[in-house]
Amino acid sequence: MAEQKKGKISRVAGPVVTAEGISPRMYDVVLVSDLKLMGEVIKLVGNKVVIQVYEDTSGIRPGEEVIDTGAPLQVELGPGLLSSVYDGVQRPLPVLREKQGDFVSRGVTAPGLDKSKKWAFTPTVKKGDELQGGSIVGEVPEGNIVHKVLLPPNVRGKVKSISSGSFTVEDIIGELDSGHKIKMTQGWPVRQARPYVDKLLPDIPLVTGQRVLDMLFPLAKGGTAAIPGGFGTGKTVTSQQLSKWSDAQIVVYVGCGERGNEMTEVLTTFPELEDPKSGKPLMGRTVLVANTSNMPVAAREASVYTGITIAEYYRDMGYDVSLMADSTSRWAEAMREISSRLEEMPGEEGYPAYLASRLSEFYERCGRVTTYSGKIGSISVIGAVSPSGGDFSEPVTQNTLRIVKVFWALDSKLRERRHFPAVNWLTSYSLYSPMLEEWYSKNVAEDWNALRLWAMETLQKESELQEIVQLVGSDALPEEQRLTLEVARMIREFFLQQSAYHPVDTYSPLKRQYEYMSAIKKFSELAKRAVSLEVPLDKLVALPSRVNLGKLKFEETIDKDIKNVAAAMEKEFSALGV
């Protein structure tokens, strides 16, 4: 670390402190007052330095000491990140609780990684091997995965020595001929994106097991999605479902400025959840960054950068990572608060003028890439947005929409009808669908895209017919249009509605989704023929196979039952002469 220089505080305005007598660089970390509160340089004006402090500054007075550490805000990367719960600046909350109890005092700190725990290191290189920056030097079992120990990206040389055995993250496990000592840990500045070789096309879907998302509005691995919605529409539950069930190997969940009780639910439920793929605890592949609304506002601004840097580290090992930011609105509000304290010129609705560029900087750090280690890894970012009063025209939602390729709009009206997930199928969209068509037709079914378009078209027709129904009632419609309304209702109630809390319905594999939607389409086609033969619609709606189709999603033997119901449906229509 660089030599530490000392200065004095000249002004305090909430979490923003002005100091004199030091000459740091932008974004360097400084320690404020005798309490050694961590802060970050965010503005340089002449000989004055403006510092954003990550903790409560009450009681701090001008004249107190400020120490320049000479280094930017960094995270410690290495074995031990998985299963951890950090605050916005990577202080491990369980460790602080052991030191302090439930209420953490100011100025208390702890290293991000456990320095005493020993890890079983197995080298994958030998003496004399030529290594580039970002190369994998060995492996360590961690949580539900194998942690690949990486060289820092800016280091290269021949292996002079390498050891195997049990080591702490601080121990030297090898050396390069350049003199670089190899350790299992490395630091990385959070505001600087980790480098990669090449960015790849997003042509593989992130399978979520949520029918409305996978079938209608798919997200690609390395893609970006926004979940905007008013209070109580299910943003947090949707984020948690994606954390549990998406086919990413690593999950980074950033609770950025959410209410304490919501984050408590995450912290209490996640350790009890089982990873459906390995049968081990879900926390074994999860990193939680908890920065609730009652924590200092400045650390909230840093928390998303801490989360994305940890995600990039696991991406560099060749893993698929999904990052949930819940919610980016609270992050933007933290920026607005700090901007007003800096007396900057406000933009729309008081947000800083650089809101759009900050959001872009964050989202562009995702992607599916070829890493320096030669492997392919990805980061998919799903940002929840909490617009005030559910108004999607406010600046954070609008700026996010310009950046992301998938928009899952949560609807308060659907919530009132107890339709969950409350994703509005008319206003949501996915720009990845054309790129993912080939993957779906190869890996699930050739007519997957045709089935998806048919479902979207049916729901669109229903929306148009509903306007007429409100004027004249559904009985005034011809039988064929009444059938369209009935089929759309089946798609909505049987397929799109999904219970996050039901053991069977909570996750739906792609094959099951395809067969379920195909069975609904089969009913639609047979019923159309029956209606043309003047079979009353009421008779068709009352068919046992149609009723059973609605109950199927809660049955444990659903995959077998769908085929049985489809076969029964054909027999019932044959009996009607179709």
Image: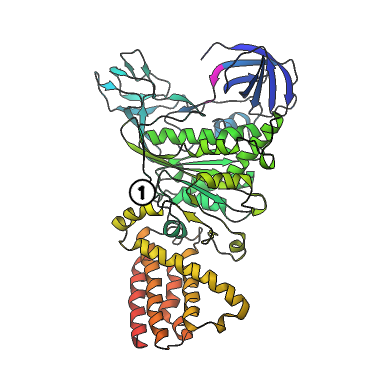
Mark 1 crowdedness (10 Å alpha carbons): few <14, some 14-19, many ≥20: many
Rendered position, 382 above or below 315: below
Q: Does residue 175 appear left or right of residue 211 in this picture? A: left
Whether residue 507 is visible, yes or no, is yes
Q: Where is residue 540 in the image (x, y as percent from the top left)?
A: 44, 83
Q: Where is residue 427 in the image (x, y as percent from the top left)?
A: 54, 58
Q: Does residue 63 appear left or right of residue 285 in this picture? A: right
Which quadrant, please, contains the C terminus? bottom left
Out of 145 and 203, give the one closest to the viewer: 203
Q: How many labels does the image show?
A: 1
Out of 284 and 4, give the one closest to the viewer: 4
Q: Where is residue 252 in the image (x, y as percent from the top left)?
A: 48, 40
Is residue 151 part of the magenta span, yes or no? no
Residue highlighted by disc 1: 204
Q: What residue type is labelled 1?
A: Ile
User: What's the magenta region?
Assistant: 70-74
Rendered position, 82 above or below 57: below
Out of 249 and 445, give the one closest to the viewer: 445
Residue at the location (62% across, 59% down)?
412
Q: Position of residue 433 (x, y in %)?
A: 40, 54
- Magenta span: predominant SS is strand
Q: Does residue 277 appear left or right of residue 347 in this picture? A: left
Whether residue 87 is visible, yes or no, is no
